[in-house]
Image: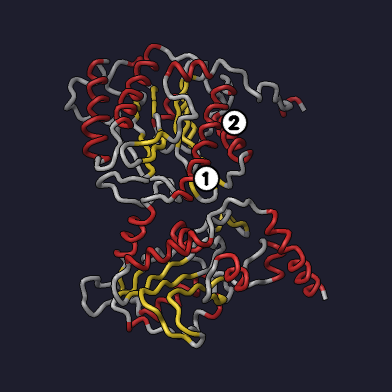
Amino acid sequence: MKKVLVVLLLLATAFTYAQDLPADFLSSEFHKERRDLAREKMPVNSVAIFFANPVRNRANDVDYIYHQDPNFYYLTGYTEPHAVLMIFKDEQDGPDGSYNEIIFIQPRNAMAELWTGRRLGVGGVKEKLAFNQVFNNTEFEGYNIDFSKFDKVLFYDFFNDVRDTRTEGDLFDLIASFKRKAGYPTEGVIDIESKANNLDMETLDQIMKDLRGIKTADELDLLRKAVDISCIAQTEVMKAIKPGMSEREVQGIHEFIFRKYQSEYQGYPSIVGEGHNGCILHYIENYKPQISSDKMILMDLGAEYHGYTADVTRTIPIDGKFSKEEKAIYDLVYKAQEAAIQACKPGVNIGRDLNNAIAKRIINEGLVELGIIDSVTQRHLYYPHGLGHHIGLDVHDKGNYEYLEPNMAITIEPGIYIPEGAQCDKKWWGIAVRIEDDVLITEDGFELLSDLAPRTSDEIEEMMKQPSALDAFVLPDLDKK
């Protein structure tokens, strides 16, 4: 009787739940169009296989919050685990007629949904995601498909890090079943050069790079919102930051604002590094309990909104005023970044044209002028990373990097990092500056997406003079309880 009541309750609340969700997700038409475009790019007589992301265990019986594989989401809109998608180049014959795609998803389960949330099930996927051929994942093992008849079976290779949940039809079972059906070797490696082998683990990634690297108008709507949210957070932190705060507190202000605007996640682990911590490029500990008034703080954070993530970095003086040395380094990074942004247009190469010929040259010339290096050809690690990358469903999104094209969304992010003990005057030690902005390539140039957050040193100092809505937010001192 209890199980019957649970089922009835779930059915009764399904309609209400649908009304509770935001209305600006990508449409089922978008995802279907993406599948059709992927199919057009597939080789003759081929099938493409996509698996949902695995559930990751955090500790004991607690899992990390689930995040769908970006390719899987891009092509389906399905956000649940334990699923597999097959896209066929050509029409296939089935008992219910012909089809060119099929998806296997986790079934409805009243007791499981009571604990971990509602599932779409077969009916929901057909209705909301516009698939015709939908089956429960428990049916994949018995589904009759002969992979040997295809010239190419396209898929991403496996990392063997999927847990067996002991639930029939889980991702572990789906992968094992696919391997058996497709003749994936149980030992050794696949000979990708063999003409007898139709398993192709390279072509699919290029197809997805071609598709995901060029954003549609619908994607850009979501990406703009993610960027705007991230910029507003940077601006509010400029107003709110005070010496004595912790790095974690600064991180928390950013992420509170993300949630205030209904951002579901951070697009990547937040980076908030005071002083020499900013010299660690992916510093995510954010553990310093008190930030100092005589230091800068590097803040690299991005809101993820409906799957699309921004990537915005600002470096600011904690006391609101750049020192002479801090301003010299900051303005040099800004000069390099601004020159690279202004050169963005279709046909330009990110590495050769923007980074090497512009950003790196300007930074090296400036470091020589400041006496930090001896010559523009001197090898150093003060600028150790590339200039930018695609953004989208991944913070380092799939895309091609040879030449810029219209509707590519990229970052431009030069930086200078001078750690303690560097081979230069000690007055520069501990200065780390990265300025990162998000740029859309247009038909004849660029659009700066992240212009809501101050960028120049003067603009930052002016913004930091403004009062903060958080100035009156004071919590009890735990040590005085």
Name the quadrant of the C terminus.
Answer: top right
Which residue is more in the foreground, 22 or 8? 22
Q: Which residue is mark 1?
A: 304
Counting from the top left corner in percent of width and height, residue 406 is at 33, 45
Q: Residue at x 58, y 54 (%)?
A: 65
Q: Amino acid at mark 2?
A: Glu
Residue at the image point whose x is 21% and y is 77% from the top: 195
| Residue type marked 1 | Glu
* 13 lies above or below 93: above
Residue position marked by numbered label 2 in the rendering: 249
Total marks placed:
2
Disc 1 element: strand
Report whether 100 appears left or right of 445.
right
For this view, does 72 lie left or right of residue 405? Answer: right
- Alpha carbon separation for disc pair 2 and 1: 20 Å
Q: Say if 240 sits above or below 321 in the image.
A: below
- Seen at 35% across and 29% down, the residue is 415
- Looking at marks 2 and 1 on the same chain, the residue that comes earlier in the sequence is marked by 2
Q: On the picture, is 98 further left or further right than 244?
A: left
Residue 138: name its quadrant: bottom right
Residue 186 in sight: no
